[in-house]
Amino acid sequence: MTVDSGKPKVGHYLIALLAAVLHGKNPPPLPPELDLEKLYKLAAWHHVANMAYYGLIRLDPLPPPAVMKPFQEARNLALVKEARQELEVGQLVMALEAHQIKHLPLKGFIIKHLYPQPDMRLMADIDILVEESQLQAAKEVMLALGYTAFSEGANHDVYHKMPVMNIELHRALIAKSYPDLHAYFGAGWERAVLKEGTNYHYQMTREDFYIYLLGHMAKHYRNAGTGIRSVMDVWVYKNQLQNQLDWSYIQTELRKAGLFDFAQNMETLAECWFDGREYSEEYLALTQFILTSGTYGTRRRAAVNRLIKEKDAEDSFYFAKLKYTLRILFPERQHMAILFPILNQRPFLLPFTWVIRGVRTVLFKPVRIKRRLGDAVSLTENHSAEMEKIQRLSGFRPERRS
């Protein structure tokens, strides 16, 4: 999905709406020329339409009912979804505790309680870290609770339960496919502390949770882009717990993780959005990048960043593009081993697994491979240069494949 955030005023007014909700204040009046249909589409793309509703209802006069309806429906759905998620996760955590399975709930399920209302922080998935050796036991618990195993492998196993439950059981805080971040965070258990009154329910310290929040954001940001909600999470967490955090520890650890510059830029951007700090040209550029990324980024941006990873300093753009295209057709062994675990013991079978994957893709996923190849072919030097500029502005050096 693509959304025309086009005119910066649409995106900036959406941010102003969310800022008003966070501060419990009335938002600025609707600009007469604002395209309200685009406002809703952009809010929905970023999964914040439900929260924007709480700002719109404080306007005087109220927007027309036809404008309010989709925002109200998003809010109503979020209320139901949040209540169901809270109940289901409570039951799951109790079941994991009863079966002596170490578990650590992550991200949105924790941070939603710092928002003015938990339904404002919409979640598509519930993420829970489980010790890898206990994933099979956790699967039996999930199935007993009525979940269906949707997929297994890579960094997380996915379970669904109708109508709104999507649970991801993670092997590590950050996948091995992000080597720098994985090297810092590891599996995650060394940063876990047992929750009081439990034997198997773990949590992170407030400081480590904030570092993880930024690390997870950086992962998405460097892959395909990230959305409004990620920046808002940073502001909410810091604003709510500012005086309770050991900032010396946080800054030291962010430097170790290679996240210090990125964290500073995202914190400053959050202050521009939600505290009225004056924008520089650089932060306007970062704002536009995020507004046009949607919640989870875009395919085009993911393709550009993967191409940049392939580009060595001496490579021409077109040689890097060729390497990236070949990587789509012939993935490296570490990726193929997720699909074909036998490669961990018999790496010489890699060419045969490429053939099997190719046949499966042509038969079952022809549209997907066509899109990925189409994205690769359509990339230009300008796309690469613009992305490298954004990454530098964000506090990253262009990432290369090791």
Image: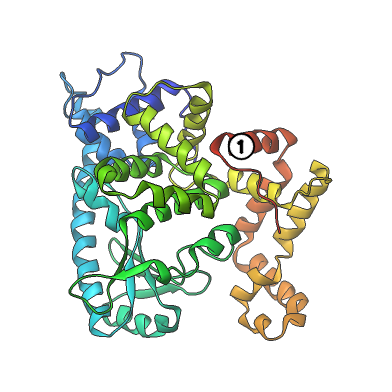
**Local secondary structure at mark 1:** helix
Residue at 42% across, 53% down: 211
User: In which quadrant of the rendered view does residue 81 lie?
Assistant: bottom left
What's under tag 1, amino acid-wise?
Arg
Measured as percent of width and height from the top left, residue 366 is found at: 64, 60
Q: Is residue 49 left or right of residue 10?
A: left
Q: Is residue 390 above or below residue 8?
A: below
Q: Is residue 354 above or below residue 271?
A: below
User: In which quadrant of the rendered view does residue 207 lie?
Assistant: bottom left
Measured as percent of width and height from the top left, residue 58 is found at: 16, 27
Q: Is residue 70 above or below residue 175?
A: above
Residue at 63% across, 78% down: 340
Regarding residue 69, the answer to whether it shows in the image is no
Residue at 47% across, 30% down: 287
Measured as percent of width and height from the top left, residue 339 is found at: 60, 74
Query: Which residue does the numbered mark 1 point to in the structure image?
Result: 392
Give the colour scheme shown: rainbow
Q: Is residue 269 left or right of residue 49?
A: right
Mark 1, Cα crowd under 10 Å, few <14 / some 14-19 / many 20+, is some
For this rendering, which residue is in front, 111 or 5? 111
Q: Is residue 268 above or below residue 323?
A: above
Regarding residue 184, the answer to whether it shows in the image is yes
Residue at 29% across, 60% down: 164
Q: Is residue 132 left or right of residue 87?
A: right
